[in-house]
Amino acid sequence: MTPTCTSEDIQRIINKLKKSGYKLTPQRQAIVDTILDSVGMHLTVEEIFDIVKKKRPEIGLATVYRTIVLMHEENLVTRLDLKDGTARYELTREDEHHTHHHLVCIKCSQVLEFMDDLLDPIEEEIGKKYNFKVLDHSLKFYGICNECAKEETFKEETKYDKREG
Amino acid sequence: MTPTCTSEDIQRIINKLKKSGYKLTPQRQAIVDTILDSVGMHLTVEEIFDIVKKKRPEIGLATVYRTIVLMHEENLVTRLDLKDGTARYELTREDEHHTHHHLVCIKCSQVLEFMDDLLDPIEEEIGKKYNFKVLDHSLKFYGICNECAKEETFKEETKYDKREG
DNA sequence: TTTCTTGCAAACTTTTTGCATAATG
DNA sequence: CATTATGCAAAAAGTTTGCAAGAAA
């Protein structure tokens, strides 16, 4: 479920950046490394910055922002919105037909990932019905994770603020 | 597809607010009216503010924010993230089993809505598989709308920034 | 009259940008 | 060496909050 990263990943990323004419600076290397090391963690830019800073204290937050923007434009990272006010990013996995999806616990905010291609027929149907050329989809399930379900009985009201439409 | 609002909607909202102990001020009324009048438009708080201000210039932006937060907590509005940097809100439709979903054009940013309950069996399956009590889901399809498809041939690169995982 | 709400301004948070300096290919 | 990238600090943009004055139940 949580794939580990290979040296192919790092090569793929570096090649793509080079191909687009970007220089490979130590700062960018450090940021790429951090993203590769944090698969499944859905880090914010600030969190990436904090990790990178440990190895290279001279690095600036603006550089991290600029690098993430750049990687996002190149589709090397995918943005994820978990409704806590800051954007989060994760490595775009090359091997996935579509991006994977997320189970978001509205009690503890834990995020599980899952792959599922059951959506493909729906995608096709919707495309035809609305004359819309579907390229990708994003799916999130909101609910209560196993641990939180054990802890206490869930109260139906509250916590709408963790979901989105 | 784009449902119009009935007086039942406004009664439902007002009753819910009253029931939760909130006072019904003219400011809140104006904001509720605006949201009811803008179904399908996915307004930002600032946009709601601009509309409300025309009728009641004395109203403050903070009041609009506070009212939206409050309505969101009461599940009267649903937050929607269309990746343009600001949160957007829409009326939570009472009659829907789940919230409706969105087709987002990555060229022109147009947002179409669609209802679909084909996801229910997937929801159930995922729930069992991951021991996750699913309460709701959010689904977005990203692609090219009919108009944009006509205009020009789509170039495969670019525009990843409009999508999310 | 008591409590909740408003408007304003200030504070905060996240993200972007200008600019001089430094590093890359 | 020409160009691109960096770090810093300042600016933007979106959202939240403190507080005194005002309105609702």
Image (cartoon, coloured by chain):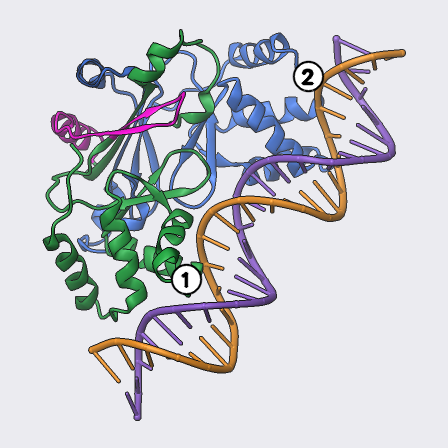
Chain colours: A green, B blue, C orange, D purple
Farthest residue, direction front: A54
Between the residue at mark 1 and the residue at mark 2, the CA separation in whole angstroms equals 53 Å
A60, above or below B114, in the image: below
Q: Kindly identify which residue carries mark 2.
A: B24
Name the residue that disc number 1 marks: A57
Image: A30 above or below A112: below
Viewer-proximal residue among A144 and B117: A144
As rendered, which of B53 and B62 lies closer to the eye? B62
Q: Position of residue A96 (x, y in %)?
A: 13, 40
Give the percent coordinates (x, y) of residue B61.
65, 38
Element under disc 2: loop
The image quarter in which residue B50 lies: top right
Instruction: Name the image quarter holding the C terminus of chain B.
Output: top left
Asked if residue A50 lies left or right of residue A75, the reply is right
Q: Secondary structure at mark 1?
A: loop
Give the amino acid type for the residue marked by disc 1 in the picture: Pro
Relative to A113, residue B132 above or below: above
Quadrant, the N terminus of chain B:
top left
Residue A95's disc is none
Q: Along the horizontal axis of the image, is B155 left or right of A59?
A: left
> For the point 26% across and 62% down, which residue is it?
A29
Region rendered in magenta: A102-131
Q: Nearer the viewer, mark 1 or mark 2?
A: 1
Of A55 and B60, the residue lying toward us: A55
Q: Would residue A119 be counted in the magenta stretch?
A: yes
- In the image, residue D7 sits, relative to residue A118, either above or below, namely below
x 15%, y 42%: residue: A4
Neighbour class for label 2 at 10 Å: few (<14), some, many (≥20)? few
Visible in this render: residue B37?
A: yes
Query: Residue B164: horizontal and vertical position, in percent?
Result: 30, 41
Q: Quadrant of residue A12?
A: bottom left
